[in-house]
Amino acid sequence: MTLKNLILNSFPRYCENLISGKSVCFRPMVVMEEKSLLMVKDSQNKESIIKTLVNIVSSCFDDFNTEEYSISDLEHAFLLLRAKSLGEYEEFTITCPVTKERVHFNINILNNIILNKPTTNSTIKLNEKLILVMNKPTVNHILKYPEYNVNSESIYAFIASCIHQIHSEKTIINCKEKPEQEIIEFVQNLSTKQFKSIINYFDSLPYVEFLPEYKTSDGQTRTVSIRGIFAFIDFFFNHLTLEFFYRQNFQMNYFHNYSLTEINNMIPWERSVYVAQIQSHITDETNRANNTRELSF
C-alpha cells in the first residue's frame, strides 16, 4: 500500500442512501481532487468536467459503477461529497431576473436538498403500432454525450442510446443488436408529438434540485431553481477561483512551511481552517507592527 493510500484510508467514512435508494459509503475528497475540478470548471468543457467528476467520485466512493449509477445518483453523490469535503453551508449572490438587483441567499446542502422521485413509466406509446421501452440514463450516457440538451444535435444520439427495445405489431427489436446510426435516424424521423413524448419521459425521471427563496426590494419572495450537474458544479464550487486557490497554498507554504504534498492530501475544509488561522495571524502581526510604530512616535 502506498503512503498516499495510507493517508486516504485514514479519512472518515460516510454512508448515505442516494436518490435511487442505493446505499453508498465514501471518503471526503482531498485538495488535489478539488484543484482538478476547479481547473476543468474554468475550461467550460463539459466533457472534461464530467470525466474529471466521474474520476473523483470513482476514487472517493466504494464500488462506483458507471453502468449502475443514474445521472441523478451522480448529482446526489457530488452534493454529498461537496458537503462532507468543503462544508454543508454555502452563501450565494445572484442578480434577480425580475428586479435586476443583487440578492443574497444561503443553502445548507444536506438540509435543503430536494430529492424528487416521480413514478416513471419506462414504456412510451408512439402510436397504435409502435411502443418504445426505455432504459434509465446512467453515468455512461452522460460520459458519452455530455453536451446533450434539447437544442443540440447530440440529443438524438443520447435518446437513441437510452432506447432498450422498439415494439411493433410483428416484432420486438433489441436496439443493442442494431447499428447506432440506424437508431439515431429512427429518433430523427419521429413526429413532433412523438419526440415530445420522449422528452416527457426524461422529464419524469428522478432528479435533485434546490429551490432557495429570496426577497427583493418590491417585497416579493421569489425562488431560484438550481438543478443539473453543471449547475451544481457552478454554484457549489463558486467559492474558490484557481488564483485564490494558489494564493492560499502559497500562504500555507510560506508562513507555515507546509509542503505541497501535505496540502494536496488535506481535506479542503481542513485546509480552509489552517488558511483562516494564517490570515488571522497575519492580521494580528500587522496590527501589532502598526501599534509599535505609533508608540515609537
Image (tube, rainbow, N blue to C red):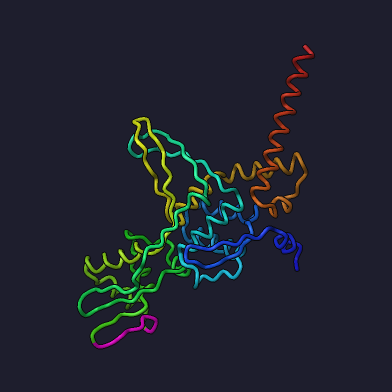
- At a point 36% along the width and 74% down the height, the residue shown is 134
104 is higher (above) or lower (below) than 287:
below
Horizontally, is 123 left or right of 81 in the view?
A: left
Q: Is residue 157 left or right of residue 289?
A: left
Q: Residue at x 47, y 66 (%)?
A: 20
Residue 234 place in picture, x, y as percent: 48, 49
Residue 133, image x, y percentages = 33, 76
Can I make out residue 205 in this image?
yes
| Residue with the most extreme top position | 297
Question: x, y percentage for residue 119?
Answer: 36, 66
Furthest residue toward right: 296
State the residue at coordinates (75%, 49%): 259
Of the 4 image quadrants, the one containing the C terminus is top right
- The answer to if 58 sits in the magenta stretch is no
Residue that extends furthest to the left in the rendered view of this protein: 128
Residue 35 visible from this viewpoint? no
The stretch drawn in magenta includes residue 171: yes
Quarter location, residue 203: bottom left
> Magenta stretch?
170-177
Q: Is residue 57 above or below residue 110?
A: below
**Marker count (numbered):** 0
Image quadrant assignment for residue 121: bottom left
Q: Nearer the viewer, residue 10 or 97?
A: 10
Quarter of the figure that contains the N terminus = bottom right
Q: Position of residue 202 (x, y in %)?
A: 35, 65
* Residue drawn at x 71%, y 63% as measured from the top left: 9
